[in-house]
Image (cartoon, rainbow, N blue to C red):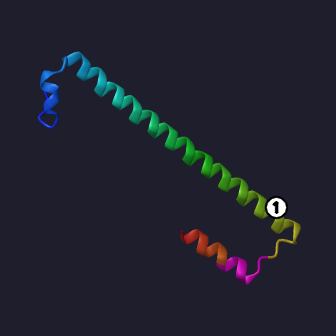
C-alpha cells in the first residue's frame, strides 16, 4: 500500500504491481527513444562536420579568421 496513492488501498495488489511495471516499461522505452534521438543528432553532427571539412579541403584548406572565430564559438556551446 502506498500512502501517496490512497486509491491503491482498495485495488487488487496484482493490478497495482502490473500497472507500476507497465509504467516502468514505458519510462524505459522513453529513455531508449531519447538515446536514439541523441545518437541520431550526434551522427548528423559528425556528417555535417565531415562535409564542412571536405568543403574546406576543396577550397584549399584555408580557414579565415571569421571561420576560426565561429568554430571557437561553436566549440564553447
At horizontal 13% and vertical 22% (from top left) the residue drawn is 10
- Residue 73 coordinates in the image, percent (x, y): 59, 75
Q: Considering the numbered disc 1 on the image, is that residue within a helix, a strand or a loop? A: helix
Q: Is residue 18 left or right of residue 44?
A: left
Asked if residue 15 lies in the magenta stretch, the reply is no
At horizontal 71% and vertical 82% (from top left) the residue drawn is 66
Vertical relation: 32 (above or below) 39: above
Vertical relation: 19 (above or below) 27: above
Q: Is residue 55 left or right of residue 4?
A: right
Q: Is residue 57 left or right of residue 31?
A: right
- Quarter of the rendering occupied by the C terminus: bottom right
- Residue 62 coordinates in the image, percent (x, y): 81, 76
Residue situated in front as seen by the camera: 11 or 51: 11
At horizontal 61% and vertical 75% (from top left) the residue drawn is 72
- Residue 60 coordinates in the image, percent (x, y): 87, 72
* Numbered range of the magenta stretch: 63-69
User: On the image, numbered disc 1 is attached to which residue?
Assistant: 54
- Residue 70 coordinates in the image, percent (x, y): 66, 76
Q: So how many labels did they put on this image?
A: 1
Based on the displayed image, in which of its 4 quarters is residue 1 positioned?
top left
Amino acid at each position: 500500500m502506498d500512502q501517496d496513492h490512497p486509491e491503491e488501498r482498495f485495488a487488487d495488489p496484482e493490478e497495482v504491481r502490473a500497472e507500476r511495471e507497465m509504467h516502468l516499461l514505458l519510462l524505459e522505452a522513453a529513455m531508449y527513444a531519447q538515446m536514439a534521438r541523441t545518437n541520431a543528432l550526434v551522427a548528423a553532427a559528425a556528417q555535417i562536420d565531415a562535409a564542412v571539412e571536405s568543403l574546406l579541403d576543396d577550397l584549399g584548406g584555408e580557414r579565415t579568421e571569421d571561420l576560426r572565430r565561429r568554430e571557437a564559438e561553436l566549440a564553447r556551446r
